[in-house]
Each structure stands twice: as structure tokens, then as C-alpha cells.
Amino acid sequence: MLISFLFVFLSVYGLGLLCPVPQAGLGVRLTFGWSVLVVLLVVGAALLGFPLRAWSFVVAGLGLAGLVLIGKRSPLARDLKNPAMALAGLALVAIAAGPGTYQPVAWDELSHWMYLPRQFAVADRVFGPDLVNSIPGYPIGWPLLMAYPQALFPDFDEGRSWPTIVVLHLAALALIADFARHIAGLRGMDERGATVAAWGVIAFLLAAEALW
């Protein structure tokens, strides 16, 4: 799962560096990278019919290009002030130190969604007479995202897919932190005060989420 998390996070971060908005914050870039990842997977694997594994590596290569070509000019120091980067490090440690297993259960909607990613990953394609879509009304982007980290491995394991959700969560938190910093700056706070305000907002939201 650690490899899957790094694969998805670095892909999203690298694609985010290709964002055309000058001086975009981490949240905007991660959201952009996440959106590009979804669109590329759907267009390449679903609409154009490319093999999923090969196309996943092409998409990852674009993310790597962003890291190599633009990463040197990225505002890494500013990114590290965003709470999402610290949370990404915490997630990295938690995943590395965790049990490393994921046990699907029948009532878990995520487990039900894993039916399609499993088919996509094993068949290496999205459509075919031998593939059954039991939820045709659902958009296909989410199952493709769950199948994306499976490209690194010869077999399928549900536990390699759920770190994708962690990266989506981090992107949302980074965007909220950027917004909080912006609002704090408009209210006259200096950079340190704006950073503290962003941390406060993120801590409050995580506390609320933990109490659901």
C-alpha cells in the first residue's frame, strides 16, 4: 500500500505542476492534477480503448515529467507550509507502519465499487463482452482511479486501491487550507498568522470528520 500511495500522490503532484495558473497554491495544483488524472484515464482507457496498464504508465510518465521539468521551479518551500503536506507525511508513516491489509465487507460501498476496478485491472481494459458492469449508472472515472495503482503489480489486491482515497482527501484539505490562508491574508494577517489560521481550520475540519 505504501508504493500505491506514493505512486498516486506523486502522479497527482507531478500533474499538478503542469497547472497553467501562475503561482497557483498547492491546493489548486493538487486539484488540477487530480482532475487531469481522472480525465486522462477516462479518455485513454475508456474512450480510446488503450490497455489500462500501459496507459496508466503513460499518465504516470506525464506526472514524472512534471516533477522533473517543472519541479525545480516549484514553490516547494511554500507547499511545505500547507497542512496537507504534513498530513501526507503522516499518512505515509501510518501506511508504512500499518498492518498493510484491507478486508472488504459486504455492506461496504467501497467494496462493491471494487468489483469494477478488479475487472479492469485483470482484463487490462474497460469494455468487453466478458466484463460485467453491475452499476452502469455510475460514472466510470472513480473505478478507473481505484484501478490506477494496480498497474504496478501483476495481481490485484484491494488494499492497493484505497490509498487513492487518501490522496483525494489530501487534495481537498490542501485546497481548503489555501482558501483559509487567502482569507486570513485579506483580513490583514501576516504570513505566519495566515499559516496558523490554515492549520486551525484544517484541525477543526478533521476533528469534525473524526466525530461523524
Image (tube, rainbow, N blue to C red):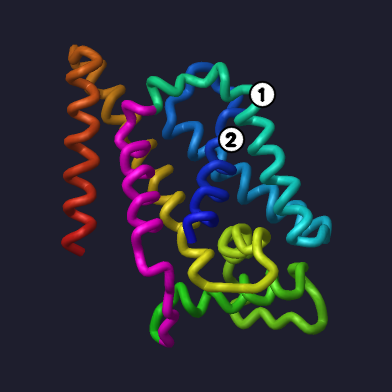
Q: Quadrant of residue 81?
A: top left
> Residue 195 versus residue 172: which sits nearer the camera?
195
Question: Can residue 95 be found in the magenta stretch?
Answer: yes
Viewport quadrant of the C terminus: bottom left
Instruction: Examine the rendering and report whether any part of residue 81 can be seen.
Output: yes
Residue 14 has which mark?
2
Considering only vertical position in the picture, is 76 above or below 34? above
Q: Which amino acid type is shown beneath numbered disc 1?
A: Leu
> Residue 43 versus residue 163: which sits nearer the camera?
163
Residue linked to disc 1: 69
Considering only vertical position in the picture, is 97 above or below 59? below
Label 2: which secondary element: helix
Question: Can residue 53 be found in the magenta stretch?
Answer: no
Q: How far apart are the two marked residues, 2 and 1, measured between alpha carbons?
A: 10 Å
Left/right placement of residue 105 relative to residue 150 reads: left
- Residue at left 61%, top 36%? 15
Considering only vertical position in the picture, is 98 above or below 198? below
- Residue at left 45%, top 50%? 168
- The segment highlighted magenta reads 80-106
